[in-house]
Amino acid sequence: MQISMLNPNGSNVHRITFLYRFILAVVAAHLITTGGEFQSFTELVKLRGYPIAMLSSLAIAMIVIEQVHYSTLKLQKRFPVYDLAYRKLSWQLLTCLLLPFLTIFGLATIYYAVHGFFILDTMWMTNHSWQVVLMLLVLNLVFSFPQAGSAPHFTVPEPKALTQPEARCLMYVLPSNGVTKVYYDDGTHNVDNRSLEDIFKLLDTKSYILNPKRSIVRVDNIKKIYKFPNGGLKLELFCPAGTLVSVSKRQSPAYACFF
């Protein structure tokens, strides 16, 4: 039986090619250069300062696009999914929105200073800042979307294969009373002081799903998934038989392929 699963660990993150990033930079530079101007585009291109403004905007946009692209890739690897502590969301707002905005503001300040203006004495904030924020939001969506579509495939053995293991195999990991319990297919379990994230790094991440602070579950150990009206899930496992693992609404998209 073949199933597709959303990438849980970011290891197969797809990079946006440089050509597409450059096209995004050209579009962004055009919007930044012409935004808030009362002249039409045909009038603007005739101005002596337009080529310099366009090239400067292109350079700024390219720097910021590379910054957002790099930060997005790092976040996908560091935080596979959004957790209940909102760590990934907080880091994304900081590294992919606030810092790029400050980069643009700083470079725009230099541009205006070279031309003898103080940026806060111009209409930059009212004419361009909203376009910059919109551009950064779009970039976050563009660079995050491909990761959701990269779906590695797993070959799931029949349940009987779990009853005759060639060697002891880790089935799932669950925090309990301040420690981490590691359960195996022979019914035994060990107590581990390491965090779920540390244990997950030692596993074949293509065969397991990590729910931060909740569990690590082997893909071929999922027998059935129960979906609740509030968006949460319950995973029923083959081994140990009858085991149920809770999944929050925020983590549930990682199991969308099972439905």
Image: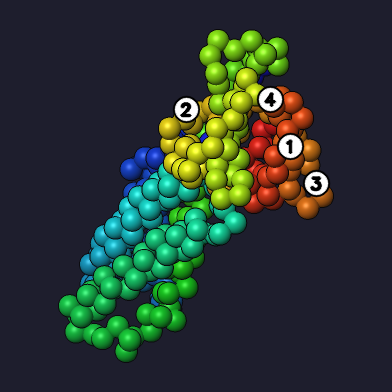
Q: Position of residue 46 (x, y in %)?
A: 29, 69
Structural distance between the alpha carbons of marks 2 and 3: 30 Å
Residue 219 seen from this side: yes
Q: Quadrant of the N terminus?
A: top right
Q: Could you tell which of marks 4 and 1 lies nearer the N-terminus?
A: 4
**Distance from the alpha carbon under mark 3 to that under mark 1:** 14 Å
Image quadrant holding the C terminus, namely top right
Mark 4, residue position = 239
Circle nearer the viewer, 3 or 1: 1
Please provide percent x and percent y for residue 220.
63, 23
Evaluate if marks 2 and 3 touch, with contact meaning CB atoms under 8 Å apart: no
160 or 93, nearer to the observer: 160
Q: Is residue 237 left or right of residue 139?
A: right
Q: Which residue is mark 2?
A: 204
- Circle 1 is placed at which residue position? 244
Q: Earlier in the sequence, mark 4 or mark 2?
A: 2
Question: Which one is in front, 33 or 203?
Answer: 203
Marks 3 and 4, the one that precedes in the sequence: 3
